[in-house]
Image: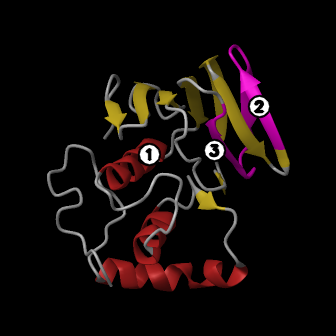
Amino acid sequence: MARVGQVLDEGVEQIEFLATAATTGGEMVKCRMRVAAGRPAPPEHSHPKLEERFIVEHGALGYILGTRRLEARSGDVVVVPAGQNHTFWNAGPGELSVVSEVRPALRFEDFVETIHVLIRDGRLQAGGKRPNPFLIAVVAMAYRDEWRLTRLSRAARLLLPALAFLGRRAGYRSRYPLDDERSTANIATTV
């Protein structure tokens, strides 16, 4: 479970929890993200039951919202409605700092922590390049209210439950907490 002040650091992106589900009664999760220039953007995704808000502190936030490619600067606020496809990246030459608010909290902090641990430990690449289909299916099915890939084919969407089942049988888990010494030490590396 995330704690206020906890920092997830994967080298080119740091996420600091400013408010958690526990401190807001489930109302929201609030994080400060510091993103180095050149860090790949997450794959296009949506949050089916969550609204996400980005408040740019400094730097340039490039983002896709629906079909539009946009940019926000210091002081700008970007609101992503629930269910809207989007992604974001550092569009400037220096560090980008944004505060992200996600409402309601649901299990968003667990999802963020899991993805961070998997990237940090080399099980996923930042930006979602060449993901292990069994691992990503297990995570995607577990957090389907919090996060969905929006560029999957219909066939891939239909196969997701079966891939998740096979992934769980192969030893992949849906949750990899930061402080869990087993975090990725015991998961399968190939299937």
Label located before the other in sequence (2 or 3): 3
Give the residue at x 58% y 35%.
102
* Residue 111 image position (x, y, % from top left): 44, 50
Horizontally, is 112 left or right of 73 in the view? left
In the rendered image, is residue 191 in sight? yes
Residue situated furthest right in the rendering: 68
Q: Do tag 1 and tag 2 residues touch (Cβ < 8 Å)?
A: no
Q: Which residue is mark 3?
A: 50
Q: How is the image coloured?
A: secondary structure
The span shown in magenta is: 69-91
Mark 2 crowd level (few <14, some 14–19, many ≥20, 10 Å Cα): some
Callout 1, which amino acid?
Answer: Val
Horizontally, is 71 left or right of 120 in the view? right
Mark 1 crowd level (few <14, some 14–19, many ≥20, 10 Å Cα): some
Query: Quick check: 141 above or below 28?
Result: below
* Residue 132 image position (x, y, % from top left): 43, 72
In the rendered image, is residue 31 in sight? no
Give the residue at x 72% y 40%.
63
Callout 3, which amino acid?
Answer: Leu
Give how far apart the Cα atoms at labels 2 and 3 are: 22 Å
Q: Which residue is mark 1?
A: 112
Q: Which residue is mark 2?
A: 71
